[in-house]
Amino acid sequence: MTEFPENKRRALKILTDPKDSQLLTHLNSCVHCGLCAESCMYYLTTKDERFIPARKVDLVSSIYQRYGTFTGKYLPALVHARELDDETVAEMVDLLFGSCTLCGRCTMHCSIGVDITAVVKAGRAMLAKYGRVPATLQSTVNAALNTGNNMSIPVEELRDTLSWLEDELRDEVNDQHASIPLDQSGVNVLYTLNPREPKFFPLSISAMAKIFYAAKERWTLSTTMYDVTNYAYFSCNREEAATIGQRLYREVQKLEAKRCVLAECGHGSRAFRWEAPNYLQKPFAFDVVTSVELLAGYVREGRLKLDKGKNQETVTLHDPCNLVREGGVIDEQRYVLSQAVSTFVEMTPHGVDNFCCGGGGGQLSMSEYGDRRMTIAEIKADQIRKTGATVVVTPCHNCVDQLIQINNKFKLGVTIKTLAEVVADALILD
Amino acid sequence: MMWYHYLTFIALLICLIGLSFHLIRLVRLGAPVDYSRRRGDVTPAIAYSFVGAMSPTKKESAYLHLPTYAAGLLYHIGTFTSVILLFVYLLEIEVGGIVRWALMGLLTLSTLSGMTILVKRMAVKPLKSLSNPDDYISNFLVTVFQLFTVARLGGAAFAPFYFLSASLLLLYVPIGKLKHALYFFAARYHLGLFYGWRGIWPLRRS
């Protein structure tokens, strides 16, 4: 393949030089039954055939066929094998970045068992090697790489925000010793943040600080590396994802924390807990848990006392795909809500079958696909409306952002909250 | 043995060599190494991937498309039955009595299922847009093979056509999508491994 330009050679290597049998298996398994169509929000809301998940698989697979198989090389018309040229690349950008939230619903419901998400991610990785990651998504990755957080928040601004949040915490719990500890070594918990929290939703930090106070936890925030997100997971640039993951890994080690607790962020949880050890090619010596699991543990252990009566409104739950379907945190948030709210009602479907909010897969950062994102959100709006709930809880800040936009567009009249906010509202302080 | 027996044996050998190439490549590449801390148990998850997760109550691709699912299931049962019968006839064993009639009934239904699936692929626009010549050829070859299996069960007169259709099918398996006969098992294994590692499968309904 030496005759190809370097970026094309590197892109093709992802398909033709696999590290293990996983991708090879999924590239060879799709039988084009098309039954995945009804599992995809893009197809369900638009009926556009291009959005059928199998078409996305086929797009990547057809390139693999062309360059990696006997049939594709010598009988390309038989399997519609395709050249990796400008036309194919443009289609890949539109379908793999612009019309997939990596929610994994199609994978779980595939008749064969094709990991469609893995194939789409392989296609995105090819585009990353090709230099065709959408500029909007890449700018978010670059912000994290260049400033340490994806919103380029200066350390002074973070410190100021945390300082007034600490003052408010002291007033709220009526204890002048209550604190939001920064850069402490040797604590039990290094807590992370989604940069949306200090930037737009500081009350979720207050909520978590109040919970740590009530649980008498020894915890800290890092001011140099606190960002739980990793948008390079979405761009599928493994080197950049490893760089971002490595920073948080080093911070946990530097501060000698026993546990790294991942803030309410679906993809961030996935990227650090499940993907980062593989990006870095080593197991982590410390515990990595999501704040959802931490909260469930506190409630089970009696470290938090909750009064359901303080949350009287009807509450429903939106399951973030990366946390639930792809991360296995399914029951914990339900247990916490069962202890923290008076009336809880599930969406249909929910749990591992839940629909994405529409903001996953990096869609929130790719403004060029914003109209599509809000078109597919109709499904989530319908789900919420049918519950009759007035509060939607979701343990993911990206989902919060998308749900707020859904709330506005579809005039749902609901309040969107994180799990920590609901728990903090129900807290009984000694 | 007749010439068509030899032809089928040669086709079978080529088919097995072709599939062995795919199998050896999969085995040599191996399963992915996962450095993350395991949350679940992979063995029951892999078992679940092959059994529980295949249940029509668990997959939208089944419960939202019950007629297609039923036709597909019947078609695959017919295919496996026909493959077993091919070995029976290669060994020049005759099938008789009620078993023969039962098999003819089953394979007639599965052949009709195969035809229905082929017509659906040609007629339903989203499915047509997804299809390539390999999809039609694969479906056609398997359906014709089943049809001639019914004919062979009916009597030896169709034997040359039966073995010829079997040979064509066997030669085509390693190069087209029919190799999913092998990759299906690998896909279910990988899916079970992935979801099991993270504690998602075996599924517990929330």
Image (cartoon, coloured by chain):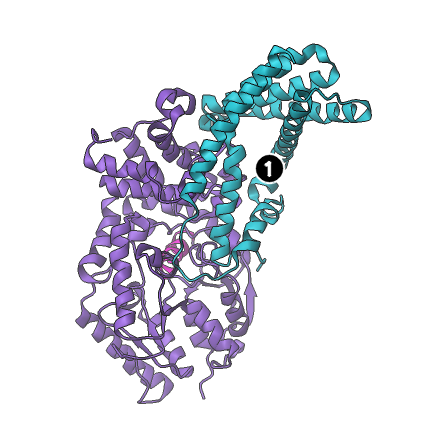
Chain colours: A purple, B cyan
Start and end of the magenta stretch?
A: A397-410
Q: Residue at x 24, y 73 (%)?
A: A161
Callout 1: helix, strand or loop?
loop
Amino acid at dot 1: His
A242 vs A180: above or below: above
In the rendered image, residue A196, in percent from the top left (x then y), is placed at 30, 63
Q: Residue at x 42, y 62 (%)?
A: B37
Q: Is residue B109 left or right of residue A238?
A: right
B128 vs A282: above or below: above
Q: Residues within 10 Å of mark 1 (few under 14, many from 20)?
A: some
Q: Residue at x 47, y 77 (%)?
A: A298
Chain to which the residue tagged by mark 1 belongs: B
In the rendered image, residue A311, in percent from the top left (x then y), is placed at 50, 73
Name the foreground residue: A250 vs B11.
Answer: B11
Q: Which quadrant holds residue A369?
A: top left
Number of numbered discs on residues: 1
Report the residue marked by disc 1. B65
Look at the image and say whether residue A132 sits in the magenta stretch: no
